[in-house]
Amino acid sequence: MLTAEQIVAAQKANIETIFGLTQKAFEGVEKLVELNVQATKAAMSETANNTQAMLSVKDAQELLTLQASLMQPLAEKTVAYSRHLYDIASGTSAEFGKAAEAQATDAQKKFMSVVDNAAKNAPAGSETAVAVMKSAVSAANNAMESVQKAVKQATEMAETNFATVTAQAVNAAKAPAKKR
């Protein structure tokens, strides 16, 4: 049985976890706002420079050359912005994942402690039921670990795919620029 002190300690730990996750969420939002402010400032500055450059164009050929030269940096900046956005999102998500994993591990330990305590105090003849209960808890723990490993592998694969697509996008943007 849980004592009042154990319940209070568990509630306190849960509240600390919630406040910690809220702080991480705000940090993620703060990074996102900072990224968007920087991107907006850079875009405004580049727009002013590009407008000045276009106003100084003398003929159609020069205009086409200027437009082509502007596409490469735009593609690279778009990819860089997407990468920063992805890094912010995945970093915040990783913090939430770590907290959830820690909470699950702690809950599993506490539940196993309750099961072990119940097994010690079980009446004679209930050994089979206790063994079945322990086996079920062990199977559930193994299943949880398998799910956590699968999620980590899927996340790593998604990051690898994102990096590959990003590299391909940059190379695709560079290809037309080199032909001219």
Image (cartoon, grey):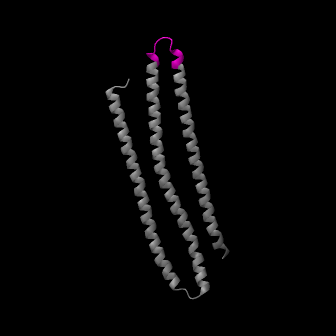
- The residue sitting at 46% across, 50% down in the picture is 92
Q: Position of residue 34 (x, y in %)?
A: 41, 61
Viewer-proximal residue, 142 or 175?
A: 142
Describe residue 37's horizontal placement relative to residue 161 as left or right: left
Write the start and end of the magenta stretch as one range.
119-130
Residue that extends furthest to the top in the rendered view of this protein: 124
Q: Position of residue 27 (x, y in %)?
A: 40, 53
- The residue sitting at 52% across, 18% down in the picture is 129
Q: Position of residue 176 (x, y in %)?
A: 65, 72
- The residue sitting at 42% across, 57% down in the picture is 31
Viewer-proximal residue, 157 or 134?
A: 134
Q: Quadrant of residue 143?
A: top right
- The residue sitting at 58% across, 73% down in the picture is 71
Question: Relative to 42, does residue 82 appear above or below in the rendering?
Answer: above
Q: Quadrant of residue 32?
A: bottom left
Indicate whether residue 121 is drawn in magenta: yes
Residue that extends furthest to the right in the rendered view of this protein: 179
Q: Quadrant of the N terminus?
A: top left
Question: How many numbered marks are there?
Answer: 0
Describe residue 16's horizontal placement relative to residue 168 as left or right: left
Q: Quadrant of the C terminus?
A: bottom right
Question: Relative to 95, does residue 48 appear above or below in the rendering?
Answer: below
Describe residue 60's horizontal placement relative to residue 47 as left or right: right
Question: Relative to 110, does residue 127 appear above or below in the rendering?
Answer: above
Q: Position of residue 44 (x, y in %)?
A: 45, 73
